[in-house]
Amino acid sequence: MSRKNYLCIMRSQPQKNTQKQAPSPAQMEEMMAKFNQWKETFKDNIIDMGGKLGEGKVVTTEQISDGPFVEAKEIAGGFMIVAAENIEEATEVARQSPGVFPGSSVEVREIISS
C-alpha cells in the first residue's frame, strides 16, 4: 500500500477574557522535550513541519457577506504535511502533536494530486 500525503490544518479558538501568560523557561524546556519526542516518533511521517499562518487574503468571485462564517484568522493557525498509509494513521500523528492543546483541533485532509 502506498502512502498518501495529508494536510493537517491547526485550528485554535481565540481566547476570550483570559490573559495569556508567557511560559516559564522550565515550561518551555518541557514543551520542547515533548515536541522533540513527537518529532522523533513520527520522523517517517512528517513531510513538512509547516508553520504558523500569518495574515492572508481571500480570493473569490463572489461577494463575501458578514454571514455565519467564521473568519479564517480565528480558526487556521498553522499547518503541517504528513505521509501515512491512511487517514487514521495521519490523524494519530496529528493527535499526538504537542501543538494540540485544549481549545484547539486539527483538521486532517488527504492531498489528492492529479
Image (cartoon, helix red, strand yellow):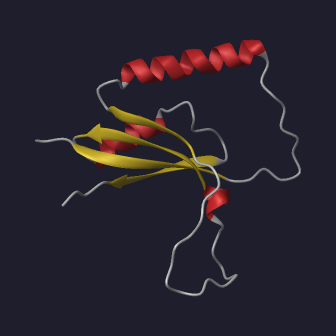
Compared to 83, does 72 lie above or below?
below
**Residue displayed at 36% across by 26% down:** 42
Residue 100, percent from left and from top: 57, 38
Viewer-closest of 87 and 73? 73
Residue 63, percent from left and from top: 59, 87
Quadrant in the rendering for residue 43: top left
In the image: residue 98, left or right of residue 27? left
Q: Quadrant of the N terminus?
A: top left
Name the outermost residue toward the left: 1
**Residue displayed at 52% across by 73% down:** 59
**Residue displayed at 56% across by 48% down:** 105
In the image: residue 7, left or right of residue 2? right
Compared to 29, does 70 lie above or below?
below
Residue 37, percent from left and from top: 47, 17
Total numbered labels placed on residues in the image: 0
Q: Quadrant of the C terminus?
A: bottom left
In the image: residue 110, left or right of residue 37? left
Quadrant in the rendering for residue 30: top right
**Residue displayed at 28% across by 45% down:** 5
In the image: residue 39, left or right of residue 27? left
